[in-house]
Amino acid sequence: MSQIKEKLLILPDQPGCYLMKDRQGTIIYVGKAKILKNRVRSYFTGSHDGKTQRLVSEIADFEYIVTSSNIEALILEMNLIKKHDPKYNVMLKDDKSYPYLKITNEEHPRLITTRQVKKDGGKYFGPYPNAGAATETKKMLDRLYPLRKCRTLPDKVCLYYHIGQCLAPCVEEVTKEQNQAMVQDITKFLRSGHDEIKAQLTEKMMKAAEEMDFERAKEIRDTLSHMDTVIEKQKMMIGDLTDRDVFGFAYDKGWMCVQVFFIRQGKLIERDVSIFPFYKDATEDLMTFIGQFYMKKEHIKPSEIFLPEEVDGDLIEQLVGVKTHHPKRGKKKDLLDLANKNAQIALKDKFSLIERDEERTIKAIERLGQAMGIRTPYRIEAFDNSNIQGTDLFLPWLVS
């Protein structure tokens, strides 16, 4: 501790990153600061909540790296977290990716779901944080537009041809114009051309009924009903067709919830919910979260981002390369307020579960250390003694 006190005295009043280490020299937390001297010293002075006290109790040493600006500190922080994967930076360990619908750039294109976005000439639509929504939409479009399904063309027709979901370019001649027409209709539908597509299907249904083809009419009617179900899940929020992500957040008791609304072509298609502990300034942690959010290669950046008033929009623009806004009134402000409200509700609902899990894990191991008169164990080693037939007793080793 004396070494830490000496280091605290010589901290610079400049921006940068700091790396907290435990007794084994393992980096357990990475943070950034506009003024390193003030931020790092704050961990060792004053009172903290339980989880911050737990972090501080494990700090045996720290390092720091000075940067020339706050944006450089933010970028460096994200890279250090990605490199060292510190256990207390739990909010940034999420490696989930979102599915997209993709129309492939091939002679005979396919409609597929993918979690990797590449510059391959394909058309991408999404993201869909709810994979089920992407699957439902694809199934419906497969029934409407019989693009090929096989990755490689076989030498005979498959089941999809027999159920009317493929034109079988493997054995039949399918023209470029036919494929382009289907691609255009799918693109139109996924970009909010639902009404036009519904009108076309309704006309086909009526024509099939007039021709006494009731089976076909019933099939189209079921497709229209399924389409209404899919579209109902996409509530129109804003009149324009701009793609945007809306970030709302709430924090309490050292925990933060971030809600991201994905607005595509004016519709709220899905949302992402993340809940995590934070150890410094809430808005700074939110900016780090946003930076990490867009570091994922598979995430297509929108045209603009809506941010809470507290967040430095200029800094996010430099970091992400996307135009930011702080809505002040109207539907856009209502949308941001809705994201914040959802974050507050989600945080409140999760508190009991979070606290129960912490009681069962972290606090349990702390009480074990107290009962045995040792420091909180960081590793428990157990040995399989089934081969000694109970003749001796082995106890696990606890390393504190």
Image (spheres, rainbow, N blue to C red):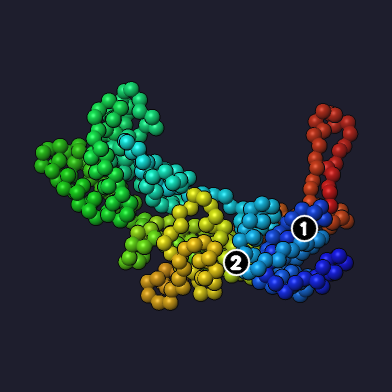
Which residue, as the protein is rendered here, is positioned at the far bottom?
328
Circle 2 residue: 71
* Quadrant (top left, top right, bottom left, bottom right) of the N terminus: bottom right
In this view, the residue in front, 192 or 324, is 324
Residue 139 visible in the picture: yes
Residue 253 visible in the picture: no
Q: Which amino acid does label 1 sit on?
A: Lys
Q: In which quarter of the view is residue 209 placed?
A: top left
Which residue, as the protein is rendered here, is positioned at the far top?
155
Label 1 vs 2, first from the N-terminus: 1
Residue 156, above or below 202: above
Residue at (80% x, 40% y) in the render: 382
- Label 1 and label 2: CA atoms lie apart by 24 Å
State the SS at label 1. Answer: strand
Which numbered circle lies on residue 68? none
Circle 1 residue: 21
Q: Picture coordinates of residue 240 (x, y %)?
A: 32, 65
Q: In which quarter of the view is residue 169 placed?
A: top left
Q: Which amino acid does label 2 sit on?
A: Ile
Residue at (36% x, 56% y) in the render: 233
Residue at (24% x, 43% y) in the render: 181
Q: In which quarter of the view is residue 3 placed?
A: bottom right
In this view, the residue in front, 285 or 210, is 285
Residue 195, above or below 14: above
Residue 286, above or below 144: below
Q: Is residue 293 left or right of residue 169?
A: right
Q: In this view, does 329 lie to the left or right of 160?
A: right
Q: Do residues under tags 1 and 2 come within 8 Å of each other at their CB atoms?
A: no
Q: Picture coordinates of residue 188 (x, y %)?
A: 28, 51
Residue at (23% x, 40% y) in the render: 177
